[in-house]
Image: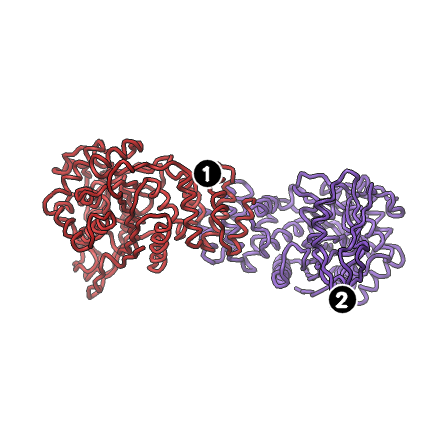
Chain colours: A purple, B red
Amino acid sequence: MRPQDLIRIKRDGGALNAEQIRAFVRGVTSGEIPDYQTSALLMAIFLRGMNRDETVALTRSMIESGSRADLSSIPGLKVDKHSTGGVGDKTSIPLAALVAACGVSVPMISGRGLGHTGGTLDKLESIKGFRTNLPIPEFVDTVRKVGACLIGQTADLAPADKKLYALRDVTATVECPPLIASSILSKKAAEGIDALVMDVKTGSGSFLKGLERCRELARTIVEVGTGLGLRVVAFLTDMDQPLGRAVGNALEIEESIECLKGKGPSDLETLVVEMAAEMLVLAGTAKLIDPARERIRFAIRDGTGLKKLREIVVAQGGNGKVVEEPSRLPQAERSTPFPSPSSGFVTAMDAEAVGLAAMALGAGRRTVEDRIDPAAGILLRKKLGDRVEKGEPLLELRHAEATPLEEARAFLSRAYRFGSAPPPGRPVVLGRILG
Amino acid sequence: MRPQDLIRIKRDGGALNAEQIRAFVRGVTSGEIPDYQTSALLMAIFLRGMNRDETVALTRSMIESGSRADLSSIPGLKVDKHSTGGVGDKTSIPLAALVAACGVSVPMISGRGLGHTGGTLDKLESIKGFRTNLPIPEFVDTVRKVGACLIGQTADLAPADKKLYALRDVTATVECPPLIASSILSKKAAEGIDALVMDVKTGSGSFLKGLERCRELARTIVEVGTGLGLRVVAFLTDMDQPLGRAVGNALEIEESIECLKGKGPSDLETLVVEMAAEMLVLAGTAKLIDPARERIRFAIRDGTGLKKLREIVVAQGGNGKVVEEPSRLPQAERSTPFPSPSSGFVTAMDAEAVGLAAMALGAGRRTVEDRIDPAAGILLRKKLGDRVEKGEPLLELRHAEATPLEEARAFLSRAYRFGSAPPPGRPVVLGRILG
């Protein structure tokens, strides 16, 4: 069958079988199928959808396009966590340390920030010496010895995903549940894990907008992950405001350390505890969620989580002293307050605008080639429900002396809304979808 | 705006404005917009549609992508006819001669056959010496002197269409009314015409299947053509069986000559008279359709149509003697009857299968590089409603001695259905859509 015949089937709303999908992914990976046919199929998939079997087949084919990390030499079930991305979302860092401190192996392949969302790798690289480009054997070795390792995607894991993602980015076919699910799950399955906790962000700062579409994505990931033989639980979590108070790479490492000391913002701590506990249950080291939460909270209280973070940092070549002395992290030259234009309660936030403002300060990338300023970012002094007086600082901008502030200020000027009463409270965890 | 932002608008069901469409077509023509973005937009257009204003803007931008033939030195309104393509559809040839014989200029840019449908250029080139690649100045000159000229698309007329069509062909985005309309109308408007009669074929041999989609295409062409300032009338005509009795290039030239002598098959003559008369009305040389029909029929009876065909052939470098002696046309080495497998009335025909059988005999191209055998083809001895006895010839295959017949026979074995009673009669002209 020619590629255009497969495109036609999907275009007309039909389902592709596993053999057809495999042939397509092989052609994409080898370069035999030109990009213009691939992008036409991606748009047809975007608009016509894919059922569970198609998405499982797509994911399997993407896994088969490269090699797989072999973690079988490490005892126990290996559990990872992945997020669709948000603003101020540093969850992975305290969570990996806590879960590993509780004896569960966490092999984690993370991403970089692009656009308004940050990336775990960029945050970790604000620690001097921290290497995120370990080759797979060293990655496996670190997981075995330390219990956790956080690296970037390597060229040999799911190369089809790399090709498809690059095309999706420039053809407006990113925000599509089956394509997102296959992209995430192909990388995750290729890293050799047994179970996954998925954090689907929803709100003004999530890249996929609309609660229903986010719920659909969460369901798709659970169904397809289960179809691949993984244990998967998805959380639907709030991103109507940044998570915690720090947005920016070194600032978020500092906040992660605070969280591991039990002094972090409550929304961050809640999310870390909920998802870390779920990971213990998925790994089978806890039977029920309540005792699992207790174990995670204990690892915060007794400092074993923080100690584990230090071990991870050192194992990956970073300066372990930052864990005790976060002031060793890169520090911005300037701190500029952003005063509130009104008095009242913060009734709504545009988390995306905050993320874009941080990017404009140098904390993120506009294009993949951009360099990041690890010290740049934003500290939130006021969040949803907080009372503020006109002129009082809403946020604090951290930046280099030479950085122009106009663009960040423009984004921030539309990031807050005020009212005469606080908005109704909203929990961090909005839903939990089991396989 | 980046191309992906335009794609996103269309993907989400929005309408693009004229400026956005112009930017896109310019980028496609210049090569600045890569094919993978173009094909994603084409698929989004296929599945989301385009409204009248968008399609007018698209067509205008495609016209602006190249040069336009200037026919203003020729007095009177210039009228062309175009068909979506069918099997045995040689209408353009007698029609151009008859309309020109009645004093109306017919500048006609035609196509080649591909797949199961034939092309006017291939048919004309079966006349020894006939040139279809005249440069535009010679084309204009011939229209002025002879009243009609039939050539192929030149590289400088609507080059954007050439690029878009090539991509549509390999990305399953061909059968889309706004894209078809803009492709046809951009070429037609660029050739400098004032009015157009459009023949939208519908039935088993048409490339767009389904009466409703064909009607939608006819309406779109009339609306968009009118929006471009052209006078346009569209006919919806029957293609549930081949038109006339001849399928194949030289065979169709011979049948065209028969038609101009008043001895052609009645379905062909009816269609030629109806559309030629409409062209006289559009050109303003006839006020009403009835007297226009009479003038066309008179040009058949008095032989001026046939004389005009000879003039056209000679003006374009062809051997004019074929008009008096069609036996000078290429003749196939062999004539092989295809016997009826059943007795009964012909109740249904698969015209596409007949076209594919003719292609298999050498009358058409599988790929654009294929060479054609001008003498090859099929003569239909039985058509819808005819009574046939088992073993009696249904068709006659004309072919070179070396041509294998298996593939053609396989197509033909499913081309006819038989029953105990003739099917209800169906007119050739199924509908007429005015601007």
Q: Is residue B203 visible?
A: no
Q: Is residue B340 above or below residue B127?
A: below
Q: Name the disc covering residue B411, or none.
A: none
Three-letter code, disc 1: Thr
- Helix, strand or loop for disc 1: helix
Q: Is residue A204 above or below residue B92?
A: below
Three-letter code, disc 2: Pro
| Chain of the residue under the numbered disc 1 shown in the image | B
Q: Is residue B221 visible?
A: yes
In the rendered image, residue B239, in percent from the top left (x then y), is placed at 27, 54
Q: Look at mark 2 in the image and give the residue it sits on.
A: A422
Number of on-image labels: 2
Name the mark nearer the viewer: 1 or 2.
Answer: 2
In the rendered image, residue B161, in percent from the top left (x then y), is placed at 40, 42
Q: Name the disc covering residue B29, or none.
A: 1
Q: Nearer the viewer, residue B312 or B169?
A: B312
- Helix, strand or loop for disc 2: loop
Q: Nearer the viewer, residue B246 or B197?
A: B197
Q: Residues within 10 Å of mark 1 (few under 14, many from 20)?
A: many
Which residue sits at x=12%, y=37%?
A: B325
Which residue sits at x=79%, y=55%?
A: A394
In the rendered image, residue B197, in percent from the top left (x then y), is placed at 28, 49
